[in-house]
Image: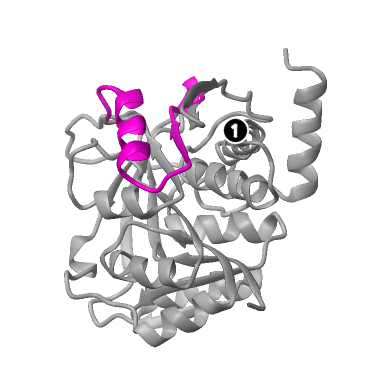
Amino acid sequence: MRTETDVLVLGGAGVDTIVHVPELPLPYADSYLIRPGIKTRAGQSGDFVALGLSALGLRTHHLDMIGDDAEGDLVRALHRDHGIPLTAVPQPAGTKRAVNLVGPDGRRLSLYDDTRSREADRFPEGTVRTLAAAARHAHVVITHPCAQALPLLREAGLTISTDLHNWDGANPHHEPFALASDLVFLSTTALADHERTMRDIAARGRARVVVATAGADGAYLLADEALTHIPAVTPPAPVVDSNGAGDAFASAFLLGWLGGEDPARCALYGAVAGAHACTVPSARTDAIDRTELQARVAELAADPV
């Protein structure tokens, strides 16, 4: 098979409106004066993964359903400006959008517009097969059309990764993604026992590696049945926004994983990229490049303290 794409990213294209708030949770008030203002920009989970992978030098193609609307124009422009191929399947319900409330410490609360997706959403089978035939790996966002594409990706012989985000370990929507993927990312945020959930994913599914990110507490890596804690990396600048940090972690981990690196080394890549993402203002979509990532990892390896 002749590959033209290192990673095919499915789903997660959309637009966020960023609103800075004085604290989270936000106390009730009749009104607030917002600084540094309110900004709408393209960039949801799949977009951030695609941007991160591309910045790291991996050939990336993004597939999603996008509306013929202003939000869709922003998504198309983002990919065009960064030179990332985008296959946009028409979405009559409109392009995905959300409002992100961002606190002074960089934490966020995302409000997703659920009217922009439908249970019947599907990617054309022929489109998935064609793109998969030219790819090495697929990273799948947890949306309805992506769930239907999982068997086609597996049939094409691709390895698969996914991010379950703040899964509680029980919601059935996430389960097909968890069990069909070779590499699973998730957050510890909603997990009562992250180790139990990680081991359950590995025992019942195909996952060879499971990673649970824990924000400032670092991450947990399950590989070869061994659970390892990955310490957080000190950000290179003040933390301003955690939006996209998990996507940056996944992108950098994939760089190492696809390059045959040890999972612990991949997790260090992820920790460095995630820390960098927390220093990027919410209105921007900058991603760490391979040179900076490898330099920072080399520094940490030389002086782990």
136 w.r.t. 220: above or below: below
- Residue sitting at 23 percent across and 77 percent down? 93
Pick out the residue farthest to the top. Answer: 305
x, y percent for residue 75 = 47, 71
**Quadrant housing the C terminus:** top right
Q: Is residue 138 magenta?
A: no
Say whether residue 22 is visible: no
Crowding near the residue tagged with mark 1, few <14, some 14–19, many ≥20 C-alpha atoms within 10 Å? many
Say whether residue 116 is visible: yes
- Label 1 secondary element: helix
- Residue sitting at 33 percent across and 72 percent down? 95
Question: Left or right: 105 with respect to 23?
Answer: right
Pick out the residue farthest to the bottom. Answer: 126
x, y percent for residue 219 = 49, 27
Of residues 35 and 304, the one nearer the viewer is 304
Of residues 288 and 150, the one nearer the viewer is 150
Disc 1 target residue:
271
Give the number of marks: 1
**Quadrant housing the N terminus:** bottom right
75 w.r.t. 292: above or below: below
The stretch in magenta equals 191-219
Question: Left or right: 233 with respect to 108?
Answer: right
x, y percent for residue 159 = 51, 59
Type of amino acid under label 1: Ala
Q: How is the image coloured?
A: one colour
Of residues 23 and 190, the one nearer the viewer is 190
Of residues 195 and 166, the one nearer the viewer is 195
- Residue sitting at 43 percent across and 55 percent down? 45
162 w.r.t. 127: above or below: above
- Residue sitting at 51 percent across and 65 percent down? 158
x, y percent for residue 52 = 60, 54
